[in-house]
Structures are given as structure tokens and as C-alpha cells.
Image (tube, coloured by chain):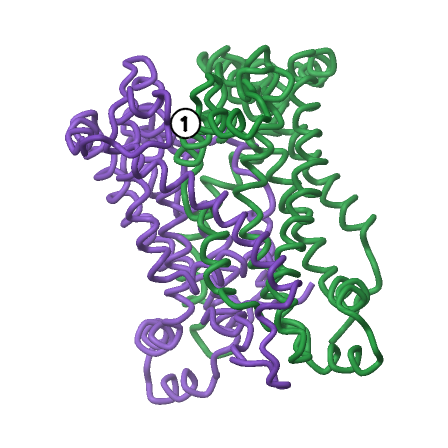
Amino acid sequence: MTIQIDVEGTRSEAQPAAHPVGGKDRVFSPVNVFSHTVLIAWSILVVVPFVWALIASVKSTGEIFGDNPWALPKELLWDNYAKAWDKGVGQYLFNSLVVVTGGVFGTMLFGSMVAYVLARYEFPGNRFVYYLFAAGMMFPTFLAIVPLFFVVKGFGMVSTYQGLILVYIAYSLPFTVFFMHAFFRTLPTSIAEAALVDGASHAGTFFRVMLPMAKPGLISVGIFNVLGQFNQFVLPSFLSPEKPVLSQGIATLLGSQRYENDWGTLFAALTIAMVPVVAVYLVFYRQVQAGLTGATLK
Amino acid sequence: MRHGSYRFVASFLAIPLALYAIFVISPFVQAFYYSLTDWTGISPKFKFVGLDNFKTLAHDSVFKQAVGHNLILLIGLPLITIFLALVFAYLLNVGGRANAAGVQGVRGNGFYKLAFFLPQVLSVPVIAVIWATVMTSTDTGLLNSVTKKIGLGTSEYLADPNIALYCVMWVLIWGSVGFYLVLFNAAMSGIPKDIFEAAIIDGAGRLATFFRITLPLLWDTIQTSWVYLAILALDAYALVAVMTAGPGGPDNSTYVMGLAIADNGFQYGRAGYASAMGVVLFFLTLIIAAVMLRATRRERIEF
């Protein structure tokens, strides 16, 4: 398969030729009416559950599961958010932010270092290292979760920030290396050579010349990693039971709020988990779509 | 190669490779090793039992049930997801047919892609909680209140062992379609416009253009998608773990291999046995990827 990565996220968009060349506006043709009906139906199916959850976050349990679950709340129960925060959501969010900050920083640094030397330096074993990382994209993490737990336990890092950060970096490397490798290949070699001739060290050339040039690629894969690590659920639920991140916290709250029959609080927690991700998505959606689909187009 | 660059390469590779070896490669290798032992996961002592774990596995009815559920997902998930994504990608693109461009979108193209893709950026627990609520089994559940009103009656969804697995499959499909739509759309825009122009000049209709030109040229992408969806179907752990009662219920009707690995490895103290399940999953993934790629192989079309 050929490598076909879209780093800026713009080339993959259909070229917006605003109007058909023939000048005929086909918007109201039967085919288009049918297309829009189907597409709008699916949009509703996707968006409505999220909007409903957003509204449910200021409802009482009685209103959520009452006779008409679709009704708007009589009064806005902002208290649900305070209760969710007290239930540990504040702490879970903090844990997530610490781990994702460390994880993404390490992933980007190490990932682009590996990608750079693999893309630009010939040395024995270059291909081997490349395929070693590429293979990591193939198999579900789940496969080795039991031994992984004991590896982390052996380092005494179960339920610690550093444990999760290191594991997140290790599991994010394959895609980051793969993506940045393709990106570094597209950059011109002449500038780096000029820097080396001028007496810059290899490392200096990488940090001061190549990394700034790779900024569009770094942003794309960086956002991908932020979302991926923020949403990570399987790894922390086994490796960090005592220090839950937000996605784990949601799963835990589902259990406890079901028991307490207090669903408004659960949806408030859910909203706290959703809003940052949706905000990042709306701002960077071109890069997000390019980054995520770039992983598969290979 | 300049003098001193080997040292530079080594210095850049050392830390990342060490991390990768410790946390990714070694657990995979260890899974193979432990699968041949009776290790409990708690006591440091264990002994080799050869292929005993695999023999036990062959008669483990709960595990076989789990494999069966994964296989149902394996058939349904890629088929329905790819079908829907292709239909939507087609519908997104037919509007611009007058332009002779195969990929010029209908109006609102950007909005649809923005909306459809949304589930992909949210975590599995968020999606699981929302859908578990939508499919509440009581009459006043979100979905039941709608289906009752339009005369379709009500359903118990996740509480009904006959359909619970299909409810899980639906949520997986619902979450994946947007991703593959965007993927197919990106691949379609890589097809040169003159191919479409030539087809139209030759008198090809909309459907003919789609089936004779677009689809064959997308084949590589569809193939890759199939493999990725198959891997997702073999996993499905996170969604089942959060969404279903038990998890894996009711009556084990949604029990998947991932749950079996977690239960044996962390609850029942049978880490060796759980590793054997991981090894089975490994080979299943490998076989399915190989079979899919071979069975669907066609002559590659360069453009």
C-alpha cells in the first residue's frame, strides 16, 4: 500500500468549486432532496444523543426518566455540576490533564526524534526499527494487558502519574513515528545540510531547524495524541485503579449513580468530560480528521 | 554518512526504543511465555504446563461463547459500517455530478462530515453511558418513548439477551461510520477528475460511475478499513465493559474475549490462562488480517 498522508488536513477536502460549471443549480433535484434527507437523518441520530445528555445535566432524575424524557427541565439544576465535582470529577479531570500533558509532550519529543533519524539517516537496522514500530499499530493493546500490568507493577508504578505517562508514550509511539516519518520525508534536505555545513551539530539541526519546519505535522499528530490519550480507557482502568482519569471516573460514576438513583449528576460529569474534547474538535476538526484518517490510509 | 552520526542516531533512539521495548514489546513476548505456565499472577512461583492452557481453552464453554460473540461482531460490524459509510460518501458527492467532478460535495458537505465524525473524538465510556440511557428498557426510556408513539412498540434492548449483542454492535457501527465516511471521502478526492470526465463523455450514469469507477479505485482503502473494523470487532472490550450489565450480561449474551482475559487475569487469579487467551486473540487477529487481505485482493489500479 502506498503512503498517503495528509498533513495539513486541507488537501483531503474536496476542492470547493462553488458552482457547477454548467451553471445549473442542482440543489433541488430529486437526487439532492433524497441525499439531504438521508444525511440529515443520520446527523440527527449522531448529534441528538449528545444534546440530550447536555440538557439532562441540568435535570432532576425524575425528569430524566419521567413520563416524558424529551421534555425540557422545569428549572435548571446547576447543582448537579457542584455534586459531580464533589464526587471526584474535579480530581479525575486534574489526573487526566497531568497525564495527558506529560504523555503528549513525551510522545511528541520521542516520536519525532525516532521518526527523524529513521527518515534521514541510513544505518544498519533502520528498516527493522521502522517495522518494529509499525507493527505496534496492528494489534489491540488488550492482548498483552495482563503481562503489562505486572511490568508496571514491577516498577512500582501502578496508580502513579509517571506509570501512566510512560505507558501512554510507549503506546502512542507507533502512530506518531509512522506519521512524522512520512512528514520528515517530505521536507527538503538542503536546509539541514546547510546547517550542518555551517557547523551545527546533528541534534542542534534537529531541534533548531527541522522541528520548526515540521510544525504542521506536529500539530496534526499532537491533536490526535491529545484526544487519544484523554479518551484512553482500557490502559488506565487496569494500570491506575487508585488514581482514575476522567474516562474511568465516568464509568465508575455510572455504577455509583445508578445505585444512588441520581442521574443528573452523572450527566453533569459526562458534560464536563465532553466539553473540552468537543471544543478541541470544533476548533481543529480539519487536523483531527486528517490525523485520524491518516493512520488508516497507508 | 558523516563522522559521529552513528552516535547521534543511537542517542536519539535509545530512550524511545527502551520505553517501547519495556512497555509494548516485552508484554507481548511475555504473554506467549506465560501462556505455557500455570501462573496465578499473585504467587511468584509457577511451572511450565506446556499446551495445557490451550487444551483447557478448547473446552471452555464460556470462552467459546465469547469467541462466538466476537465472530458475530466480526461479520456484522465491517459489513454494515462500510456499507453505510459508502452510501453516505456517495450521497455527499452526487450533488456535484454536473461539474463532472466525482467528488464535489452537496451543499453542507462540511457540516455533515463535522457531525458524522463527532462520536470518534469522544471516549468510549461517554458513548456507552449515553447509549445505555437511550436504550433504557422501561416504557419511558428515551428510545422506547419514541417507538411507542409511532406504533413500533417497546423493546428491552440491553436487558434482552436475544438482542443485547446487536445493541452493542449498533453502538459500534454508530460510532464508526463517520470515521470511514471521512476516510472514503478523502480517498475519493484523490481520484483524478479526468477519469470521471472521460466516463461521463462515454455516457456513464451516476450509478455506473460509482460502481465501475469510484468503487474499484477505492478498493485499497475499503480493504484496509475492513481489517481495522475486524480488529475493533475482536476487541469491543471497553464498550461491553461499561455498557452491559455484569458486564457481559444478561446471561453472558454480550460476553467477549476481552472480558474473558480481564476476568481470568485479574479476578480469578489465572494470569497464565488469560495470557493463553491473549495468544489465541493474537493469532485470530493475524489470520483474519491475512485472510481478508488475500480474499479481497484485486489487481492494483495505479492512478
Is residue B114 left or right of B74 when viewed as pictured?
left
> In this figure, what is the number of numbered marks?
1
Mark 1 burial class by Cα count in 10 Å: few <14, some 14-19, many 20+:
some
Q: For the point 72% across and 36% down, which residue is it?
A: B75
Quadrant into which the C terminus of chain B falls: bottom right
Residue type, label 1 = Phe
Q: The green chain is which one?
A: B
Whole-percent x, y for residue A207 in the image: 32, 72
Where A63 sits versus B100, above or below? above
Q: In the picture, residue A259 is in which quadrant?
A: top left
**Would you name the residue on which mark 1 appears?**
A238
Whole-percent x, y for residue A107 in the image: 38, 54
Where B127 sits versus A238, above or below? below
Residue nearest the viewer, comparing A61 with B81: A61
Where A114 sits versus B266, above or below? below
Chain that bears disc 1: A
State the hue of chain A: purple
Where A107 sits versus A189, above or below? above
Q: For the point 84% across and 64% down, which residue is it?
A: B299
Q: What element carries label 1?
A: helix
Whole-percent x, y for residue A223 in the image: 37, 57
Residue nearest the viewer, comparing A163 with A264: A264
Q: For the point 80% across and 66% down, which residue is it?
A: B300
Residue nearest the viewer, comparing A178 with A252: A252
User: Does any portion of residue A156 appear in the rendered image?
Assistant: no
User: Does any portion of residue A231 appear in the rendered image?
Assistant: yes
Is residue B246 left or right of A102 when viewed as pictured?
right
Q: In the picture, residue A48 is in which quadrant?
A: top left
Whole-percent x, y for residue A124 in the image: 59, 64
Q: For the point 70% across and 34% down, which residue is it?
A: B283
